[in-house]
Image (cartoon, helix red, strand yellow):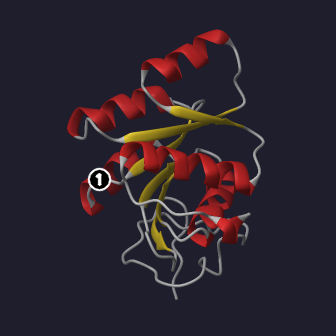
Amino acid sequence: MHVPMIGQKWSHHFRGPPAPALSAPGRVPIGPVRGTGVGVARLLVVDNEPDICALIARYLVRAGHEVICAHDSATALAEVALHGPPDAAVLDVDMPAVDGFELLERLRADHPDLAALFLTVLWHGNVLARIAGLDAAYVAKPFTPGALCSAVDELLARRGGASRQSETAR
């Protein structure tokens, strides 16, 4: 199986366990990766740190979700245009060029009901107020697989999307 390098597009959906090259240095899949669980949700994961993006994708795929990874806003928007809107977006707050807040606003321009979970190391009041103002949830970095999967499950349940207990990732 060909795993694209950063900047290349994933050309098909992957079914099965996490892509074998998720942890290989310099080989982070961009595009859809699919888990095998029941109640699969389509999740857009955007983090400018490839290793963090791959880790998040691994946890969520093990929990049974389909994951579309991107490392910047332009790729995220292109992936959504190509594959359709996700059930929820998992976004880093602090990214170069376009931050997670602006990316969510752009995504919601076409998909106003998009559920969102922010991942952040930023704890000051302005960030938390902005997250609340966007009707989004957040998980502090660093996070555990259980905390991430629980937050995604709660977000999906609140929005009425595909949800399931993510015991396999905990």
Image position of 48 (left or right of 80): right
Image position of 149 (left or right of 146): left
Q: Position of residue 107 (x, y in %)?
A: 32, 38
Q: Position of residue 98 (x, y in %)?
A: 46, 30
Question: Disc 1 residue type?
Answer: Pro
Which is more toward the observer, 153 or 85? 153
Q: Does residue 74 sit above or below 32 in this rendering?
A: above
Of all residues shown, which one is farthest toward the top?
125
Q: Position of residue 86 (x, y in %)?
A: 35, 54
Q: Let me know if residue 88 appears in the view.
A: yes
Q: Let me know if residue 89 appears in the view.
A: no
Q: Does residue 123 sit above or below 15 in this rendering?
A: above
Which is more toward the observer, 7 or 150? 150
Q: Does residue 23 sit above or below 90 in this rendering?
A: below
Which type of secondary structure does the marked residue at label 1 adopt? loop
Q: Residue at x 64, y 61 (%)?
A: 54
Q: Which residue is mark 1?
A: 85
Report the quarter where the C terminus lies: bottom right
Question: Quadrant location of residue 63?
Answer: bottom right
Image position of 40 (left or right of 108): right
- Label total for image: 1
Q: Residue at x 72, y 72 (%)?
A: 24
Which is more toward the observer, 128 or 49? 128
Q: Residue at x 52, y 75 (%)?
A: 35
Q: Residue at x 65, y 63 (%)?
A: 59
Of all residues shown, which one is farthest toward the bottom?
1
Q: Residues within 10 Å of mark 1 (few under 14, many from 20)?
A: some
